[in-house]
Image (spheres, rainbow, N blue to C red):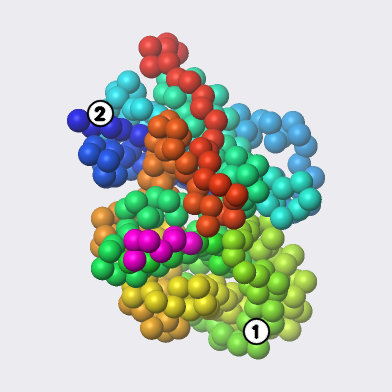
Amino acid sequence: MSEFYIGLMSGTSIDGIDAGLVDFHDNKPRLIGFDYLPFPNEIKSVIQQLSEPDSKVSLKDYGAMDNQLGHLFAETVNTLLTKFSIPASSIKAIGSHGQTIYHAPDIEFPFSLQIGDPNIIAEKTGITTIADFRRRDIAAYGQGAPLVPGFHEAIFRDPHEHRCIVNIGGIANITVLPATQSAKVIGFDTGPGNTLMDQWIQKHQRVGYDKDGAWSRTGKINHDLVALLKQDAYFQAAPPKSTGKEYFSLPWVYHKIATDDYPAEDIQASLCFLTAITICDAIRNYAPATERILICGGGIHNSYLLQLIEQNTASPVTSTEQYGIHPDHVEAAAFAWLARQTLNNLPGNIKEVTGAVRPVVLGGIYQGNTKKGE
């Protein structure tokens, strides 16, 4: 018998909302539907302003965007249900990641803040909604991230092959899946994924991202510059660790290097290589037994980035699509899985990944009402 959950994800790239419809029949997650709602430019602009390290956006604007995103998440769910002719009453729950505004797990009073009001999602869809996944892990002295390794383990772990899952969104993270079943799963944020490249090309080319790494290819990688950027303490720190675009931002780049001394396209190429080499360094240092690297997230569409990863690792690199799930759909499916964990009173974190003192049930539950009227 079908057991449907929906996962909602809006990542640090701030491009839009992913919605995945997942069937957990026989305890085996299977993505059966997907939809995507791109953010209008005005929404992107406000989210980017809210996400800036020293944002001056008012609390009024913050609250309004929390509400507006709640409506957009709900709209995405309702569109998905219509597209696949699934009644809301068939969905056990929605797992909504929300939109990260600020992630600060290492300050004196740590927190991770996501917006996209789950009250509105539950009210407008009628479906029980689970959200605010990260803060319970932080309350248990964890990083609150990454949270997808539990799902990666459920769907990609293989007893015959040591694997490493690489998720490249705005920030990149890895999940180490040993073939030995008694070995612990670990994972962490390796550093920037697409975020520095996106911000740099937005500044110089007035486009949202470097499509297929085309602009990066026109530049020359400056290895001295990359070595300088790699001296940052984050890359030297041992896991568990996590980060966000409030740290890896253009001010970070300006603080490290005199950007006017280099051609803009050379900096873009170097930022692309920085993402690739820090991913490869993380695998080499913490997953040396890796036999296969599976890539998911938006970075899969940057063929130059994938080429650089392949050139700097000994393991074969492939897409998660060859193992049952499209790379663009993995994170949305993961939050469907996390919602199911919560609804079944099961932990969603892996303490060896986040550094939490114990496994904990994540998120808050906002009850739905599938008999509601508009």
Residue 15: horizontal and vertical position, in percent? Answer: 51, 50
Measured in 3D between alpha carbons, the distance from the residue under mark 1 to the one under mark 2, in whole angstroms, is 53 Å
**Magenta region: which residues?**
180-186
Image quadrant where one finds the N terminus: top left
Q: Name the one closer to the observer, 78 or 148.
A: 148
Q: Amino acid at mark 1?
A: Ala
90 in relation to 157, above or below: above
163 in relation to 363, above or below: below
Give the main secondary structure, helix, strand or loop, of the magenta stretch.
Answer: loop
Q: Quadrant of residue 197?
A: bottom right
Front position among marks 1 and 2: 1
- Give yes or no for residue 184 being in the magenta stretch: yes
Residue drawn at x 25%, y 28% as measured from the top left:
85
Q: Name the one closer to the observer, 109 or 219.
A: 109
Image quadrant where one finds the C terminus: top left
Q: Earlier in the sequence, mark 1 or mark 2?
A: 2
Question: Do residues under tags 1 and 2 come within 8 Å of each other at their CB atoms?
Answer: no
Mark 1 crowdedness (10 Å alpha carbons): few <14, some 14-19, many ≥20: few
2 in relation to 180, above or below: above
Q: Which residue is mark 1?
A: 227
Q: Quadrant of residue 255?
A: bottom right
- Give yes or no for residue 211 being in the magenta stretch: no
304 left or right, relative to 203: left
Q: Secondary structure at mark 2?
A: loop
